[in-house]
Each structure stands twice: as structure tokens, then as C-alpha cells.
Image (cartoon, rainbow, N blue to C red):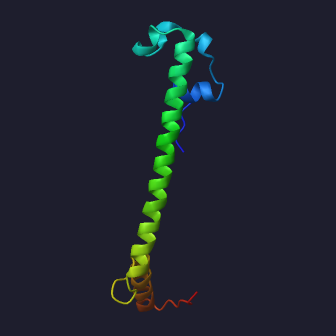
């Protein structure tokens, strides 16, 4: 999932790409500039946990979405409503047969 160690402080610290002690105060977000190192670490940990919670939510929602899509596709009857790939395959076969191409079924 999402990770950006190039410009994301949480990801950069998490992968040990940077050290908080090496970052100058003026480079930090305004909110963190007035914090002590300990407060900064706590703040970053909070953000790290919040990001993990959001990633977990995204994964859960994506799983539910995938299940819903699969369920809806199964409801469709192939005879009455062709799925996009079937429609394209059918069109290609029809055009190919007009040009005397032959196709084998899978």
C-alpha cells in the first residue's frame, strides 16, 4: 500500500531513511517546531498509528467492494447481459469470421 519515504516524515522515520535528530527544526511542520524531541516522537507515533488504522479501513472496504462486485457479476446472466470482455471477444470473433479467420474455444 501507500508509502512515500521521499517526502513523508512518518514513512522516512519508519524505514530509518532519516533520523529525527538530523532534521532541522525549520524543516518540520509548524505544529512540530515548538515540540520537544520526545513530544515529536509521540506525535509521529500517533500519526503512524492513525495511518495504519486508515490503511486497515481501506483494505477492509476494498475487500467488501471486491466481494460486492463479484456478487453483482454473478447475479447477471451471461445470456441477457454480456460482460465487457465477452462483448469484445464476440465482436472480434464476428469480424474475424467475416475475414475467414477461425477461432478455437478455450
Is residue 6 something that shows in the picture? Answer: no
Which quadrant of the figure has residue 61? bottom left
Residue 51 appears in the picture as rendered: yes
Please state, as top left, top right, bottom left or bottom right, where the N terminus lies in the image: top right
**Image x and y of residue 104, in percent:** 57, 90
Position of residue 85 relative to residue 34, above or below, is: below
The residue lying toward the viewer, choosing from 27 and 33, is 33
Q: Residue furthest toward the left?
A: 80
Give the image location of residue 75, x and y in percent. 39, 81
Q: Residue at x 62, y 28 (%)?
A: 14
| Front residue of 10 and 37 | 37
Residue for point 52% across, 16% down = 40
Marks counted in the figure total: 0
Left-right relation of 61 to 48:
left
Q: Quadrant of the C terminus?
A: bottom right
x then y, percent, for residue 12: 58, 26
Q: Is residue 77 left or right of residue 13?
A: left
Dividing the picture into quadrants, the one containing residue 64 is: bottom left
- Residue at the image position 57 percent from the left and 13 percent from the top: 38
Query: x%, y% of residue 85?
Result: 43, 76
Query: Is 24 placed above or below 13 here?
Result: above
Amino acid at each position: 500500500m501507500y508509502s512515500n519515504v521521499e517526502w513523508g516524515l512518518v514513512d522516512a522515520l519508519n524505514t530509518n531513511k532519516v533520523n529525527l535528530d538530523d532534521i532541522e527544526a525549520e524543516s518540520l511542520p509548524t505544529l512540530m517546531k515548538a515540540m520537544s524531541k520526545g513530544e515529536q516522537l509521540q506525535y509521529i507515533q500517533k500519526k503512524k498509528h492513525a495511518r495504519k488504522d486508515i490503511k486497515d479501513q481501506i483494505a477492509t472496504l476494498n475487500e467488501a467492494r471486491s466481494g460486492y462486485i463479484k456478487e453483482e457479476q454473478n447475479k447477471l446472466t451471461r445470456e441477457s447481459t454480456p460482460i465487457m470482455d465477452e462483448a469484445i471477444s464476440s465482436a472480434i470473433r464476428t469480424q474475424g469470421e467475416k475475414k475467414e479467420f477461425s477461432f478455437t474455444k478455450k
